[in-house]
Amino acid sequence: MDAAHRPRRSRAIGRRGRMLVAVAFAVLAALVRTAPLEAEERVAVLTRMLASHSDKTRLSAVLALAKLGEPQVEKPLIQALHDPSPRVRGVAAVALGRLGCDAALPALRALARDDTDPDVRAAASTAAMKLTTAHAADRAARESEAARRSPGSERGERPHATYSVEPHPDLYVLVKSAADESPGGSDPATRRAHAGVIRHALLEQLRSDASITSSAGEAQRWALGVRHLDLSVTRLAAGRVGPLVEVEAELRIAISDDSGRMLSILSGGAKVQVPADKFDARYLPALRKDALDNAMRGMFGKLVAQLRDQL
């Protein structure tokens, strides 16, 4: 976005953010990026949302906290590991693993062992593994440096070997395609844009997970079988629901192997709502984008769990 458009865009986001109800995660995320609040205040607002009776509100809050990425979000994200909603717990686990939150390791291990939801257990196990792997890599680097600096190494003597498992990915994942196949009269350019939103959201999360690779060379080194993902928007609709205008996105991820054999299909979705009396049709494209982004990010933990089940 060029400098001429940035102030106008910021004002639009600010006005839209004030109109959104709590369930509008992605627009909330835009608001916390632009509002003139300190990080502590933004985190405090989202932490209060975690006490809501609404599962959607709490999910919106935990997704927004994860997107902030500030050190202050770690405590409320650990708190969210005990949320009644398995989806909130799963998203919190994925976020803590991505943030490298060492303080969350005991809670993640307990969740991986004891949670009643298999997807949450898988997400917590993956997050705990990422933290443990990071520790192992740091330890190996320190041991290697210590060995290099030892007196024996300067005389050409071989230092005592230190054995540690080299951290490496265990999933090889490629996004094969993305398409907007939802009913309606959207033009091809708009459909390509919608497909790009979900592709970008997923690729961003795949890149942030050290246990997943998209590199053929790395996959060959560790003998990893490929999993292809075909992403689809199956529904993208806006309508009046009581006093609200609601935009709902539904997605499908088809998982296949290198031979093209379908292994499983994963579905999920998200909703964004604004008060009807404040709704402006100019915001509809942005709200659709927010719903698509939110839906894909919310599915990531369950996707990784399914991929691991197929190993």
Image (cartoon, rainbow, N blue to C red):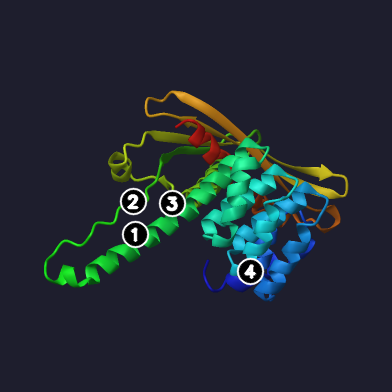
Whether residue 190 is visible here, answered yes or no, is: no
In three-dimensional space, the C-alpha distance between marks 1 and 4, rounded to whole angstroms, equals 29 Å
The tag earlier along the polypeptide, 2 or 3, is: 2
- CB-based contact (under 8 Å), mark 1 and mark 2: yes
The tag earlier along the polypeptide, 1 or 4, is: 4
Reading the image, the residue beneath label 4 is 72
Give, as a three-letter code, the residue at label 3: Ala
Give, as a three-letter code, the residue at label 4: Gln
The secondary element bearing badge 2 is classed as loop
Question: On the rendered structure, is 54 left or right of 180?
Answer: right
Tell me, for residue 210, which label it has, or none.
3
The tag earlier along the polypeptide, 1 or 3, is: 1
Quadrant in the picture for residue 223: top left
Viewer-proximal residue, 139 or 21? 139
In three-dimensional space, the C-alpha distance between marks 4 and 3, rounded to whole angstroms, equals 23 Å
Tell me, for residue 48, which label it has, or none.
none
Disc 2 crowd, CA 10 A, few/some/many (<14, 14-19, 20+): few
Reading the image, the residue beneath label 1 is 140
Disc 4 crowd, CA 10 A, few/some/many (<14, 14-19, 20+): some
Tell me, for residue 166, which label it has, or none.
2
In three-dimensional space, the C-alpha distance between marks 4 and 2, rounded to whole angstroms, equals 31 Å
- CB-based contact (under 8 Å), mark 4 and mark 2: no
The tag earlier along the polypeptide, 4 or 2, is: 4
Give, as a three-letter code, the residue at label 2: Glu
Query: Which image quadrant: the C terminus?
Result: top left
